[in-house]
Amino acid sequence: MLKYNLIPKPNSYQALDGTYTVSAATEVLCAQEFLSAGNYLTAYLKTSPVKGEGTIKIRKVGGMQPESYTLKVSPEGITAEASDARGAFYAAVTLKMILMQAQKTEGKAIVSGLLIKDCPHYGYRGLQIDESRHFFGTDVVKRVLDQMAFLKLNILHWHLSDDQGFRIESKVFPELNTIAATRKYAGLKGNGLPYRGGEYFALYTQEEIRDVVAYAKTLHIEVIPEIDIPGHTSAILAAYPHLSCKGEPTEAKCENGIFEEILCAGNDAVYDFLEKLFGEICPLFESKYFHIGGDEAAKGHKIWDTCLKCQALRQENGLKNAKELQGYFMSRANEIIKKFGKTAIAWNDCINDSFDESIVCQYWISHNLKAVREQAYKRDLIMSPDRYFYFDYKYKFLPLKKVYKFNEVKAGFGKSGQRIRGIECEHWAEWIDTEEALQFAMFPRAVAFAEVAWTSLENRRYKDFQKRLEWYKTYMRKRGINYSRIEKRVFGVKALPVYHLGKDGEEYRKSEALKLKE
Ligand code: ACM
Ligand code: ZN
């Protein structure tokens, strides 16, 4: 039995005899390469170390798996071991969670003896935020990163371009910073809601992007940008309409939905644009991955079918239909991405065998699950099936337990030879308009998600998780982090669209009422 309420649950835990006392005088000694772990702990402990008053040692050893660590607390001291900086960092995160819960007397923490040997189930443990639909800004994103690190999540997927706004400063394409970053109304129309608010303008400067990436790095989180193409590009096309098939003027959208206008696949100017744009954006990020979207382009395929340029390109290359044309388009975008030293990721609804096999598949929609399973043998795959991991869905439709019960094998994967790299949860922000609403969608589901990502299936029990979650909820209340009190599924709730409606929504109001009662 775990002595402390650790989330994600360590994969191996053993209680040891005795205790060790940590105080403000305790020294944190760590290997030079493990400074991020040492800094994480000292920032929490606020120690002024005194020699001889006890130590926490973070040591480098050979031969351990990436991201894995051991943590030992005994009357002799506290020692963490890892072979890489990420493992050392996760030892520090675990120790911080233990220290927060340890018995305190006279400003000292008495930690019970224990031995943890831990390593993650998945190497890719992602969380996505969508700042095209609503912009949160650097401070909010840093707070999201803090929470991610505390839960041992290691990938931030940053959705920065969509129909409703383009959010990265470009020095090459100035209209992206004005027209593409601006829409007429703040609040989107759809799901029964009218247009709300006035003109909405927001973007990150390149300096702010670099600042977020650097901050994430101190927490061992990789930031993957997404520039969604060829669909979901109304904002780009508002700025540069000549990049669409028809070349007609358009605007950044103030509605949710899927739109017809997409980038023209048969126009060399589009590939030139992408090369310059990606050339500018790629160096801002350190991750080897770059997400190029590819989803929900089918409406646009109808325009491709009537476009002379697209038709000519199809003929030239023997492409049978618009799906194959998209394969061509994405593979060409992938070549550009590769030139800048990155690996492309694309959503599963566009991927087929005509796609270059270096393109990673992100699985979100299951309408053609058989094909996705096949793709998992051909290319790396990240799983974010909407019915488990779309946290903009209502709690009534996607409750905590459903997230926790995710099982890769039952979802049709986990066969030998399938290249599953990990999982990701999504926070599409059409109806998420504030940090408070974002937190509501995220928590406590992201806490369950983190355990699914880290802890192997045989070590997970929902009841046991619920008990540990009580501690996490107390922690969130103390920190002023909003979270949903609705956990139960309500059968009969319409599956789609099943958005959480932010401050306008009934789920949210109910959550607020419950919060006041506590
Ligand atoms: C998606 O939800 N359109 C990837
Ligand atoms: Zn075209």
Image: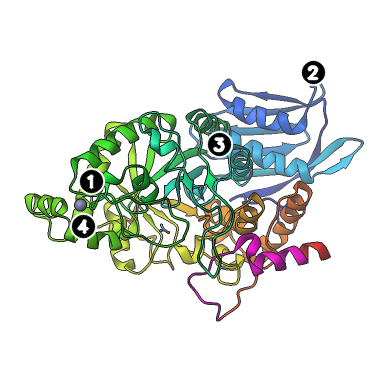
Query: Residue drawn 71% across and 44% down?
Result: 97
Report x, y in % for residue 402. 56, 68
| Between 124 and 250, the one nearer to me in the picture | 250
Q: Which is in the foreground here, disc 4 or disc 1?
A: 4
Query: Residue drawn 71% across and 39% down?
Result: 96
Tell me the crowding category of disc 3: few under 14, some 14 to 19, or many 20 or more residues within 10 angstroms, Cα based. many
Residue pointed to by mark 3: 87
Q: Amino acid at mark 3?
A: Gly
Q: Amino acid at mark 2?
A: Lys
Residue pointed to by mark 1: 331
Q: Is mark 4 within 8 Å of ligand 2?
A: yes
Query: Residue drawn 72% across and 53% down?
Result: 472
Residue pointed to by mark 2: 51
Q: Amino acid at mark 1?
A: Ser
Q: Label 1 near label 3: C-beta < 8 Å?
A: no
**N-term mark: 3 or 1:** 3
Q: Label 1 near label 4: C-beta < 8 Å?
A: no
Report x, y in % for residue 501. 59, 64
**N-term mark: 3 or 2:** 2
What range of the chain is rendered magenta? Answer: 492-513
**N-term mark: 2 or 4:** 2
**N-term mark: 1 or 2:** 2
Question: The residue tagged with tag 1: helix, strand or loop?
Answer: helix
